């Protein structure tokens, strides 16, 4: 039996994602109504530039006054696809105060201040959903929060930024350098004019913070996430990875410490074996591994960005938020009961691939090996190559604390016989 | 704030999955309570053989009277991991009548009679969840039902039976024949003593019915699913697939017809290109591709069976069912509003790989090609091999209706020059 009063939805922002959300809400209104149990009506769309042409977007719904829109008081759900911290935080809070649930695609805001938004939602008895904030259309937030709610997640490891994966994939498949690959990504629309948020890892770090918080039932903000971008990855690094049977990916890694008393979250380039399923994630696709105690290893794969995939995630959340409104209930809120602290990068256990330029004379390897031993770092393999009085040493370590590995590198730099550290990269996914 | 009255849960069945559910409920009761918002208490476990030793299962909870257990009247949730149609259907219905939500791992029952169970659950205002019924721990039911609720799924294509994937993987990697690979699967515990349900495709067909119903918001039972097992797949078929750059997988395929007016669901062995992500799913793993209009292509991968993974899925559902009980609400029920009919196999559009033993004389290819043309089936490639008066023709078609392809094969069998049809296999995943 279908209720006759339609649910009212407002949209904040009408760029690529917002236009797609509008298009689907308009063309598939019958399906949405059947799945929700009541029709949904787009009550207003807040935009900055109302005169911009947006195909299929009803102009009579446009307004530049987002604040007045969220204050209407008759809204059931507000969809936020503007992005950034302010004025969005205030708009979402205002929407809550006026009784609307919120569906957001805003990773930056969620990663910066998710806890206070969740608290506000609970205070006002409404929902806050944000499946679209991480890995586009790939269902990840809901599976972690609900399907795995009876399990213990120990690790989340994934490629969550399509731009950087496209760049690294190009470097790997064509031998191109970073700048050249970035240029191609920009030309094809995979990278923005200012690619900083992607290539410096800010985007992936925000997603890592969100995933870690949900996976470990604790609070993690972007400031807790160790972050290294890929601007220093060279064609030589990629070639070096190939020699080891690896490829280089920008990974987001969230882990529970072995003693279970803390968690870590980090984003950095890493070598992973070509046999690892993440190694075959090409172009701008995303994929996330989840390791849980009972479930084992799960992988979720799909398009990580783009108007339509992001709209799909937004609309899935919209349907659930609307169903909850109809039932007079809310879904599961934030669950941060474990209060596990986030440890610094030094506490992470990982492996290093270190490439050193050294003097080509006897005793160098012994000197280098001594430095590793002094820091309690065990060496897995060493490859030595000499040419014209110069030589290079490529050392791959066993697993050790990042702090010890990092201290080892500092000590190596001080050796007279070490002319330079050509590259350092972590090795993951084994 | 934690409620003090615990939620009461009964368990029906205590085999591999039930024991694991009990173990996790006992050892992780604190986590479950925090995630639910109230403690959960195991109120009783119905088993057939109470004297069997079950490590970690409290014997005082065991009972042989499942009916009395579900009639207690104070249960919040009943977990059913017995399997099969009766007495389980009656037990689940009785549990509903006494106010309990049900979490089930029972694919056979859901695929046979899901609609009436859903109706009963709605009638009594309780939930029916069954994430564990399809692909073990891989979150698939909830993502399809909620995360993709605002999207239009056009295709579900997957490996949903671990036993048969193990057998095919062995045949592919070792060149073993079917019987030999089955023996290994049995020895390693991947196949049951009576492997019929797996190797004849019944298990996969039940899962296909469940997936198709949810994906297309219609009703599909196992009887609607076209089913072919893998007992007739030979080492020669696998070798033939290799020559084409393919491997053989037992696939469950659910599709919306091109005109959108019907759906199809089928399970059969098929060749898929080695470059397709499903080709690299090894051993007993499961993986499912979902193609949706806005989301694009998503893949879900993980262990498809086993005590712990299945328990993970059961407990995820338990947490959600308990949360709903606490909130005095229910989750989204069955959504079969599209009422799309299920078309027969003949309406499916696919490609055939046909291997013919033919007389090695001039004009045979022309005869064979004429038969294809008469059925409006277009040929993609033909490979001809002759030896000692005998020859073989391997034909790969373009996409055509299965009915036309099947009729073509019947006509080919009638040709004097065709001595036999050595193998027929569909080609998918392109």
Image (cartoon, coloured by chain):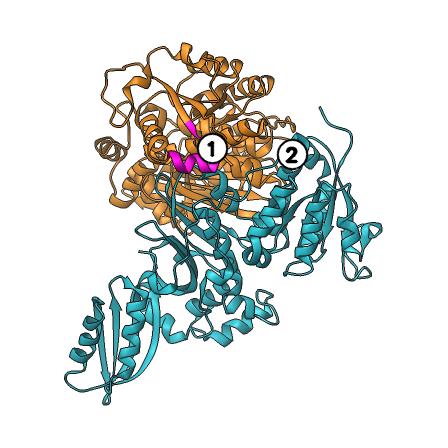
Chain colours: A cyan, B orange
Number of numbered tags placed on the structure image: 2
Residue B325 in which image quadrant: top right
Describe the element under mark 1 as helix, strand or loop: helix
Which residue occupies the foreground of this view, B413 or A182? A182
Span colored in magenta:
B29-40
Rendering coords of residue A52 (x, y %): 79, 61
Q: Is residue A21 visible?
A: yes
Q: Residue sitting at 75 percent across and 49 percent down?
A: A70
Q: Chain of mark 1?
A: B
Mark nearest the camera among 2 and 1 is 1
Residue B291 in which image quadrant: top right
Q: CA distance from mark 2 to mark 1?
A: 19 Å
Q: Is residue B367 visible?
A: no
Residue B33 located within the stretch drawn in magenta = yes
Which residue occupies the foreground of this view, A86 or B267? A86
Which residue occupies the foreground of this view, A360 or B263? A360
Query: Mostly what secondary structure, the magenta segment?
Result: helix
Residue A414 in which image quadrant: bottom left
Residue B350 located within the stretch drawn in magenta = no
For label 1, the crowd category at 10 Å Cα-Cα, with few meaning under 14, some 14 to 19 and many 20 or more, is: many
Residue picked out by circle 2? A323
Describe the element under mark 2 as helix, strand or loop: helix
Left or right position of B107 against B357: right
Give the number of the disc on residue B319: 1
Rendering coords of residue A222 (x, y %): 51, 60
Rendering coords of residue A211 (x, y %): 48, 51
Q: Residue sitting at 64 percent across and 26 percent down?
A: B339
For label 2, the crowd category at 10 Å Cα-Cα, with few meaning under 14, some 14 to 19 and many 20 or more, is: many
């Amino acid at each position: 039996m279908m209720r006759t009063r339609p649910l009212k939805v407002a949209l904040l922002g009408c760029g690529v994602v917002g236009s797609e959300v509008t298009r689907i809400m308009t063309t598939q209104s019958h399906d949405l109504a059947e799945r929700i149990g009541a029709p949904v009506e787009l009550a207003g769309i807040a935009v900055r530039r109302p005169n911009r042409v947006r195909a299929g977007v009803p102009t009579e719904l446009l307004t530049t006054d987002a604040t007045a829109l969220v204050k209407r008081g008759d809204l059931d759900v507000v969809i936020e696809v503007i992005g950034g911290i302010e004025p969005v935080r205030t708009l979402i809070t205002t929407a809550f105060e006026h009784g609307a649930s919120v569906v957001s695609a805003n990773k930056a805001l969620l990663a910066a201040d998710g806890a206070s938004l969740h608290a506000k939602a609970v205070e006002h008895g409404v929902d806050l959903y944000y499946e679209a904030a991480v890995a586009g259309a790939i269902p990840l937030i809901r599976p972690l929060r609900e399907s795995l709610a009876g399990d213990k997640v120990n690790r989340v490891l994934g490629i969550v930024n399509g731009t950087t994966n496209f760049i690294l994939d190009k470097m790997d498949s064509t031998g191109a350098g970073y700048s050249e690959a970035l240029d191609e990504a920009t030309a094809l629309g995979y990278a923005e004019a200012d690619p900083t948020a992607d290539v410096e890892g800010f985007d992936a770090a925000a997603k890592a913070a969100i995933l870690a918080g949900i996976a470990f039932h604790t609070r993690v903000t972007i400031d807790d996430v160790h972050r290294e971008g890929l601007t220093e990855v060279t064609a030589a690094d990629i070639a070096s990875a190939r020699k080891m049977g690896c490829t280089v990916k920008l990974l987001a890694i969230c882990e529970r410490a072995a003693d279970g008393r803390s968690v870590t979250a980090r984003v950095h380039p890493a070598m992973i074996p070509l046999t690892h399923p993440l190694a075959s994630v090409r172009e701008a696709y995303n994929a996330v591994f989840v390791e849980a105690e009972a479930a084992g290893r799960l992988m979720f794969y799909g398009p990580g960005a783009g108007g339509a995939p992001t709209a799909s995630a937004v609309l899935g959340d919209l349907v659930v938020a609307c169903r909850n409104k109809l039932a007079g209930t809310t879904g599961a809120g934030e669950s941060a009961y474990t209060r596990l602290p986030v440890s610094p990068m030094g506490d992470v256990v990982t492996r290093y691939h270190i490439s050193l330029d050294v003097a080509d004379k006897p005793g160098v390897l012994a000197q280098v090996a001594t430095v590793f031993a002094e820091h309690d770092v065990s060496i897995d393999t060493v490859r030595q190559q000499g040419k014209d009085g110069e030589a290079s040493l490529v050392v791959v370590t066993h697993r050790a604390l990042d702090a010890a590995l990092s201290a080892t590198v500092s000590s190596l730099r001080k050796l007279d016989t070490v002319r330079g550290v050509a590259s350092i990269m972590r090795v993951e996914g084994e």
